[in-house]
């Protein structure tokens, strides 16, 4: 699938924060190649305003990319009461790690919880499979 | 036949809480039911659906051949990397250190990009700490900072930190304990702490919030560049001041947002001049703290070392920098999946060098490995000791027999074959 076909959809810049989730973690214990793990990991949680800006519906797939990598994941509302436009959340896992920059300033610690990325509708594109992240 | 092993308690290795009250039911030699563990623990103890196969270059083989090939790769490498350790018993970790010493390897663990600095500070006596049992019995003010135990350590709050009635906390959490959550988002733990107990701060501003708390505790006006409600900060500092036995649980959110630990040291010093506060790191993998203790005992550092004529230490010997700089030329990964847990931009290099994985289960890393050696599942198929997040040593018992060797045995045999 070429990248050009996504150009028309609105694109927004976001700050990504990663977090842990017990359901996703349990799914990993059972099988990290399983459907459940993908379903719970390949998700970006957005503010409803950002969902409108992207001209998508909850549950649609989006392209998340930056200089380090790109993945297609499902867009969901975060469900937080407090609005957080411009900030999105992804559970810690191979999909979020595809976007963590290698720039550490020599400290040995990547910025797992402070990632800049752009998000855009994937127009029905399929979620990136775990073995296709490479 | 179902045999219920009541009064036989086992240890869960799902996280560094190492819950030691687990009961199981066996059918023949397989574990069919796990009682008292959380969802994650049950999944861990029942084992994965995709066990690792013993293979060299993608072809199934016997353990002896795979061990020989692993030893060959490590002896041929000039600068091998030995990484993982958080999901190994302390006995296996000591063998891994011995292999690193013998091969002049880079040795690092997951704490290198999470709780390492905090555990180092605790081992060096720079941060006051306590045990989870003391928290259960005595803590009245409990601060979860950048930590979400409801999601990461599901039984943390019910076994130790909030809900239990401990010796000096007989009236229960409603009256006897105050739980505070400081985070960048309203986590599941924040829901439990309630609106009054939850402090949502902007990402990356933890150091400034710590400074504001120090000001509040020193009876100065607590200012923040993000204009956090001063009244609320003063409410919080009042609670902290009155604590008889306070504890901060430091999560990854806190660790990642601090450039160095100075603001945390300053806050802990101030807290201990007005009340009594302890800190416990929210360690993830079940024996990551053990790895830090063992490497510290052997080298004086908790992680990020390179063996040679002398032991070198520093960020340049961290797994992240070593891979980024392509400084290593082979890797042995034990009980860890760096291709999942490290930034892909960094971890991708692992697929370019000879790679050995020891794990009970298939992982992304094993799928790219030249040599894969399955090991027994610790706490279920093999025993040993591990160190809980608060530094307490816990003994794990074997529950069921398996043909698979323990990681300790595999590492011992690799060491012998070198
Ligand atoms: S909290 Fe951790 S140690 Fe306890 S049962 Fe759950 S996964 Fe296992």
Image (spheres, grey):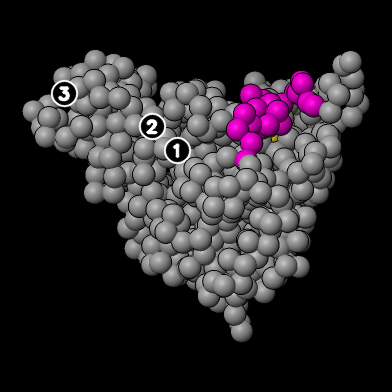
Residue appearing at x 73%, y 35% in the figure: B12
Find residue A129 and name its label.
2
Residue hosting label 1: A93
Residue appearing at x 60%, y 75% in the figure: B104
Taking the image as drawn, is residue B200 in sight? no
Q: Spatial distance from mark 2 to mark 3, Cα to Cα?
A: 26 Å
**Magenta span of residues:** B30-52
Q: Nearer the viewer, mark 1 or mark 3?
A: 1
Residue hosting label 3: A53
Mark 1 Cβ and ligand 1 under 8 Å apart: no
Report in which chain the residue with disc 2 lies: A
* Residue B229 shown left or right of residue B247 in the figure: left
Residue appearing at x 49%, y 23% in the figure: A36
Report in which chain the residue with disc 3 lies: A
Circle 3 packing at 10 Å, graded few (<14), some (14-19), many (20+), is few
Total tally of numbered discs in the picture? 3
Q: Spatial distance from mark 1 to mark 3, Cα to Cα?
A: 26 Å
Q: Spatial distance from mark 1 to mark 2, Cα to Cα?
A: 12 Å
Q: Is residue B388 above or below residue B333?
A: above
- Whether the magenta-drawn stretch holds residue A11 is answered as no
């Amino acid at each position: 699938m070429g990248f050009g076909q996504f150009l028309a959809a609105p694109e927004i810049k976001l700050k990504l924060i990663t977090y842990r989730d017990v359901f996703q973690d349990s799914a990993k214990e059972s099988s990290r190649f399983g459907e459940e793990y993908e379903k719970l990991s390949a998700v970006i949680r957005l503010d409803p305003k950002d969902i409108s800006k992207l001209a998508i519906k909850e549950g649609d797939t989006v392209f998340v990319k930056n200089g380090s990598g790109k993945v297609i994941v499902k867009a969901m509302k975060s469900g937080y009461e407090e609005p957080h436009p411009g900030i999105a959340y992804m559970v810690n896992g191979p999909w979020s790690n595809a976007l963590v920059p290698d720039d550490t300033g020599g400290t040995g610690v990547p910025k797992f919880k402070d990632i800049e990325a752009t998000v855009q509708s994937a127009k029905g594109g399929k979620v990136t499979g775990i073995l296709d992240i490479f | 036949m179902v045999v219920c092993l009541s009064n036989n308690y086992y240890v869960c290795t799902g996280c560094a809480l190492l819950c030691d009250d687990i009961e199981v039911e066996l059918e023949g030699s397989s574990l069919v039911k796990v009682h008292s563990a959380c969802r994650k623990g049950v999944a861990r103890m029942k084992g994965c659906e995709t066990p690792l196969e013993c293979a060299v270059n993608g072809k199934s083989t016997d353990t002896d051949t795979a061990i020989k090939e692993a030893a060959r790769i490590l002896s041929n490498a000039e600068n091998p990397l030995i990484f993982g350790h958080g999901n190994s018993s302390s006995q296996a970790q000591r063998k891994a250190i011995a292999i690193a010493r013998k091969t002049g390897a880079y040795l690092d663990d997951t704490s290198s990009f999470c709780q390492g600095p905090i555990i180092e500070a605790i081992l060096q006596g720079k941060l006051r700490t306590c045990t989870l049992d003391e928290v259960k019995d005595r803590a009245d003010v409990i601060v979860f900072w950048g930590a979400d135990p409801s999601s990461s350590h599901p039984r943390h709050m019910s076994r130790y930190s909030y809900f239990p009635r401990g010796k000096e906390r007989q009236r229960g959490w409603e009256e006897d304990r105050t739980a505070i959550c400081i985070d960048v988002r309203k986590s599941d733990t924040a829901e439990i702490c309630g609106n009054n107990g939850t402090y949502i701060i902007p990402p990356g501003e933890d150091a400034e919030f710590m400074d504001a708390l120090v000001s509040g505790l020193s009876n100065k006006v607590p200012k923040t560049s993000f204009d956090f409600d001063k009244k609320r900060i003063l409410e919080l500092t009042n609670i902290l001041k009155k604590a008889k036995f306070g504890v901060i649980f430091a999560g990854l959110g806190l660790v990642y947002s601090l450039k160095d630990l100075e603001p945390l040291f300053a806050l802990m010093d101030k807290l201990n001049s007005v009340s009594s506060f302890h800190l416990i790191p929210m360690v993830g993998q079940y024996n990551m703290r053990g790895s830090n203790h063992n490497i510290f005992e052997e080298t004086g550092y908790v992680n990020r070392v390179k063996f040679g004529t002398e032991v070198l230490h520093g960020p340049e010997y961290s797994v992240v920098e070593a891979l980024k700089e392509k400084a290593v030329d082979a890797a042995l990964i034990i009980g860890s999946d760096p291709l999942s847990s490290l930034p892909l931009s960094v971890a991708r290099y692992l697929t370019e060098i000879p790679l050995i994985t020891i794990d009970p289960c298939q992982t992304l890393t094993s799928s790219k490995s030249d040599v894969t050696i399955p090991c027994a599942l610790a706490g279920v198929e093999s025993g040993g000791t591990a160190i809980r997040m608060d530094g307490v040593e816990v003994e794990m018992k074997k529950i069921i027999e398996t043909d698979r060797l323990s990681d300790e045995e595999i590492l011992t045999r690799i060491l012998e074959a070198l």
